[in-house]
Amino acid sequence: MSLGNFSRRGFMKGLGVASAALGAARFSSAPALAQIGQPGNLDRSERAAEMAPEHFKVRRQPIKWPNDARIAIFWVVDFELFSDNANSADIAYYDYSGKAGFWRLIDIFDENDVKTGWYTNSLVALRFPETLREAARRGHEIDGHGYTNDNVLSSLDPEVERQIIKKVFQDIEKVSGVRPTGWLGSGWNTTPKTLESLVDEGIIWNGDYPIDDLPYTVMVKGKKLVIIPYHRESNDIQLYAYKRYDPQIWLDSFKTQFDVLYEEGDKYPQLLNVPIHSWAMGHPAGKKFIREAIRYVKGFPHVWLAKENDIAKWWLQQNYD
């Protein structure tokens, strides 16, 4: 299919019946999952047997972070929207990401001198371009996160998947002036061709494999690619966004994660990701607790507050596997 006239409303219609059926529903919804593998629907999901053997290698030798840090922490914001094929409630709810949510979060991080990674849908660049320009201006990292959150890569033909990935990078770079070098797919969704397409676009790290506590590398088309695990245990989406627990529960969970990893980091330096969503903790109730979480970790010595590009570059420089 040609991407020359790639409108938001016409996007999923051009992908064929199978893609539209899956893309019209939220990835996590039962109707979407029920259609996978049914006649007329593609299912190109990556299977364990298709994964590179490096994914299953066990490391027991401790690594080193800069300045002998016991733990590296990276903050990320899932900057997500839904396509116009989603229902109006989804579209309106998630579009909060690019309005109040973005500005509240970026101000919190800047006030506390923390640079974050923004996992960005292509549609964000089209709908809220000023946000990406501002994030780049303030020195934050912008990473690829699919076209929209209801665009499932495994439901697409291989060539369409490749074109979608290329378009995400083009859209982000066009409005921000920054070309992403990292990627987390919507819902960790991958196919046997995803990493190849991403490497073709110049990424140095990927977050789609929460298979370890620390990064590791895989070889893709002769290039060493850093896998930086993205975990949901310190994520706002389960505790706050869906179950609507008090944000204090999220903060307590985050502190527990940090405390255990910091203790272990005395012998085995560790890694902690802190993902939040601009449509969830970007609401007013999240502000107090995000600020407290940042100040909590800053109260400890030997903590490296990093961006994922920094972590990936360090990993490659140290020639870790």
Image (cartoon, helix red, strand yellow):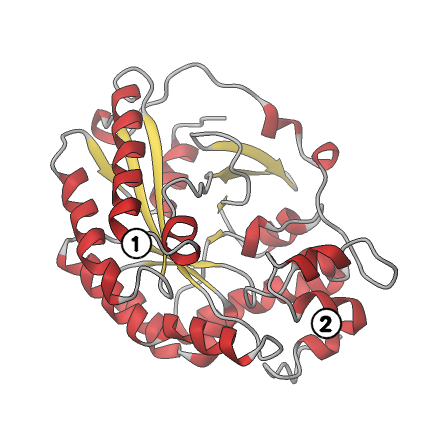
Quadrant containing the N terminus is bottom right
Q: Is residue 269 above or below residue 181?
A: above
Picture mark count: 2
Q: Is residue 293 left or right of residue 6?
A: left
Amino acid carrying label 1: it is: Thr
Could you tell me which residue is drawn at 70 percent across and 49 percent down?
193
Which residue in the protein does label 1 denote?
116
Res 306 quadrant in image: top left
The residue singled out by tag 2 in the image is 20
Circle number at residue 144: none
Q: Residue at x 74, y 32 (%)?
A: 49
Assess disc 1: are there few (<14), some (14-19) or many (≥20) residues with their C-alpha within 10 Å of its C-alpha.
many
Which of disc 1 and disc 2 is earlier in sequence? 2
| Spatial CA span between label 2 and label 1 | 33 Å
Q: Nearer the viewer, residue 166 or 27?
A: 27
Q: Above or below — where is 299 with respect to 235?
A: above
280 lies above or below 314 = below
**x and y percent of residue 302 in the render?**
18, 29
Q: Is residue 77 visible?
A: no
Residue shown at 72% from the left, 72% from the top: 20
Q: Quadrant of residue 98?
A: bottom left
- Residue type beneath disc 2: Ala
In this rendering, the label closer to the viewer, 2 or 1:
2
Task: Confirm or deny contact between disc 2 and disc 1 (CB under 8 A).
Answer: no
- Residue that sits furthest to the right in the current view: 39
**219 displayed left or right of 308:** right
Q: Within 10 Å of the Cα at label 2, are there few (<14), some (14-19), or many (20+) other Cα atoms?
A: many
User: Where does residue 207 sit, x and y in percent of width and height?
Assistant: 49, 45
Q: Does the image show residue 297?
A: yes
Q: Position of residue 59 (x, y in %)?
A: 48, 18
Circle 2 SS class = helix
